[in-house]
Amino acid sequence: MSLVEINFDGIVGPSHNYAGLSLGNIASASHKGDTSYPRAAALQGIAKMRSNMALGLAQGFLLPLPRPNLGLMRDLAIDESAPRQLLAAAWSASSMWTANAATVSPAPDTRDGRCHLTPANLVTMPHRTQEWRDTQAQLKLAFGDEQHFAVHDAVLPAFGDEGAANHMRFCEGHDAPGVEVFVWGRQGGRFPARQHEQASRAIARLHGLDPDKCIFIEQNPDAIEAGAFHNDVVSVANERVLFTHERAFADQQGAYEAIRAAFPSLEVVEVPESAVSLEEAIRTYLFNAQLLTLPSGEMALVVPSECQESASVWSWCEHMLASNGPIRKVIPVDVRQSMANGGGPACLRLRVVADPRTVDQRFMLDEAKTERIEAVIAEMWPESIDPQDIGTDALAKRVIEAREALLSVLSLDSLV
């Protein structure tokens, strides 16, 4: 069996809008009430996937969830008198950020030799709490081969879990046994810490991980206060490399030492505050990047184009490349519609180490399928959505029909 890393990107849904529902997400809050452009957003995401395929990488996708969520509207008795934010929650396209879809432990790390996936419960934010069962339904289809995969229920909602956005893995190669790092946040600050330590520990046990190969690290409260609502806003890992801001963890040196004790080959690429401030790193999402191993063995960092427009960030990137370190390429991509709602390239993808042949092929991307998806988006996705359109019958009809058209062209009608 040939295990490789597959990035499963979320296709941006036809109800993509800027309702500012995510407390602690600076970009989301700052764009609240703006007109959104779902068609452009979805096509930007597809272009990023196509770019990664052109690099020779395996690429999958996950689909938008059904919106508006009529079940949520019924359960909350949402009518004209209900707060506008509750209505917007039922329309949210936030499942596009598949880094929050689940936590994934590859087969080389687990006791039973299967890849384990636990959907995130996302209980901290009402608009995201509704996602996990529909996400799980997709995961059970895409990873339905029980010889190779185990898809669990979400962790009980007593402990908040936000998925792979707070999880890192270090290994000599994606197909080798690894060390899994879980980053959690301490409650009590101005913004909610979304990952609970006990949720992370429960997932490690559920996945059958070796306790000696699991590290639990506290996120820096200052980073959460600055808008790093997930660890992947200030750190990203790939194989031997940790690319991180120097203020990512509550005890930065202690975090390095803990990881290195379990994984001696660790290479740290640390960006100092003096070069790129925490605030600028969060504004540009320098660390919310895809750190990828190319077929050549080189590592590339796929960053938002906002990084190229920041003098301090781009200067650091150029310095990093000139230093002959482990990251040899920096590739900017345009995901501005997602960025305006608080999600960069890393937010848009769930990393799964698996043999692509064991995945339901309907969820694996190739050029022909990409063209079919693009055609549906170009024809069916709304060009723009004004926040005042949310809740109208006309927009609901269009959003539902657009998603159903996509499911049909991909032979995934069972997910309606």
Image (tube, grey):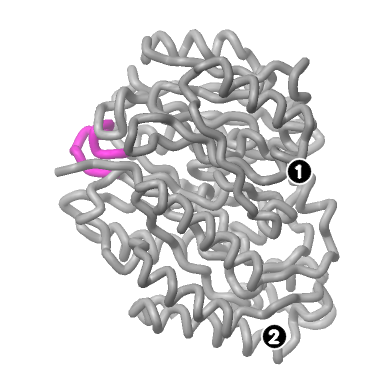
- Relative to residue 95, is residue 173 depicted above or below? above
Range drawn in magenta: 106-115
- Relative to residue 227, is residue 327 depicted above or below? above
- Nearer to the camera, 71 or 55: 55
* Badge nearest the viewer, 1 or 2: 2
> Which residue is denoted by mark 1 in the rendering?
24
Instruction: Specify whether 374 is left or right of 123.
Output: left
Name the residue: 50% across, 17% down.
325
Name the residue: 81% across, 71% down.
84
Assign the C terminus to one quadrant of the image.
bottom left
Name the residue: 18% across, 42% down.
2
> Which residue is denoted by mark 2 in the rendering?
395
Instruction: Specify whether 279 is left or right of 208.
Output: right
Kindly state the secondary structure of the residue where label 1 is placed.
Answer: loop
**Is residue 253 in the magenta section?**
no
Name the residue: 22% across, 33% down.
111
- Cα distance between the residues tagged 1 and 2: 29 Å
Instruction: Specify whether 326 is left or right of 251.
Output: left
Give the amino acid at mark 2.
Leu
Kindly state the secondary structure of the residue where label 2 is placed.
Answer: helix
